[in-house]
Image (cartoon, rainbow, N blue to C red):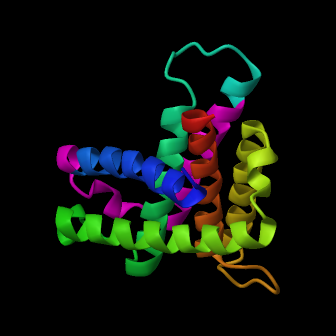
């Protein structure tokens, strides 16, 4: 499998988890403001880092946490696009899945462009480096949020969410195919 096929395979797994949770809970996440989503991604990335550094007390592993980062990053992109809602019933499950697919495809296309320019350098990285890079992107995002998005030279929150998602996908690819 090439990188695009591997990306699509792990994204299919992430989408399946998203769809099942959407079935169980609906789009309850629609009430979350963007900084709350950044914090959710932080919790997931921080747990991965903790698991990488010491023995886990809850035997779930890092795979579900990377899936959570992917899904929260896409939810963040949806929230950036639509804004948060006062109630979670403004988006049907079908609309949520359509938005999910659109943002997943945009992130794939970004990854393919960057991967071309970087010549698959991510394959030589350790999974722990993806974790550290995700955490760095989270802290950058928090700073951008604190600045109300008024940056001088930096990309916006959306670009950071896509990068977090793509690093998590790289981790999932390594855990799945290597």
Q: Is residue 131 left or right of residue 91?
A: right
Quadrant of the rendering where the C terminus is positioned: top right
Q: Nearer the viewer, residue 63 or 53?
A: 63
Specify start and end residues of the magenta stretch as a single range.
Answer: 23-49
Location of residue 110 with respect to 126 vertically, above or below: below
Q: Nearer the viewer, residue 151 or 19?
A: 19
Residue 32 in the magenta stretch? The answer is yes
In this rendering, the count of numbered labels is: 0
Q: Nearer the viewer, residue 159 or 139?
A: 159
> x, y percentage for residue 19?
26, 51
Residue 136, visible in the rendered structure: yes
Location of residue 111 with respect to 124 vertically, above or below: below
Residue 33, visible in the rendered structure: no
Picture residue at 50% right of the left edge, 74% below the top: 106
Picture residue at 24% right of the left edge, 51% below the top: 22
Picture residue at 48% right of the left edge, 44% below the top: 67
> x, y percentage for residue 2?
58, 55
Question: What is the magenta segment's predominant secondary structure?
Answer: helix
């Amino acid at each position: 499998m090439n990188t695009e096929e591997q990306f699509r395979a792990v994204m299919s797994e992430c989408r399946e988890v998203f769809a099942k949770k959407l079935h169980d809970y609906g789009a309850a996440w629609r009430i979350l403001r963007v900084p709350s989503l950044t914090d959710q991604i932080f919790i997931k990335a921080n747990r991965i880092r903790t698991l990488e550094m010491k023995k886990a007390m809850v035997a779930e592993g890092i795979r579900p946490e990377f899936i959570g980062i992917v899904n929260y990053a896409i939810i963040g992109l949806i929230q950036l696009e639509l804004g948060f809602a006062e109630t979670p019933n403004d988006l049907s499950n079908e609309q949520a899945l359509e938005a999910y697919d659109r943002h997943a495809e945009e992130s794939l296309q970004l990854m393919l462009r960057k991967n071309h320019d970087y010549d698959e350098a991510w394959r030589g990285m350790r999974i722990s480096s993806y974790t550290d890079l995700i955490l760095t992107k989270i802290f950058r995002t928090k700073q951008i949020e604190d600045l109300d998005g008024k940056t001088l030279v930096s990309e916006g929150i959306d670009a950071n969410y896509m990068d977090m998602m793509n690093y998590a996908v790289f981790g999932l690819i390594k855990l799945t195919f290597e």
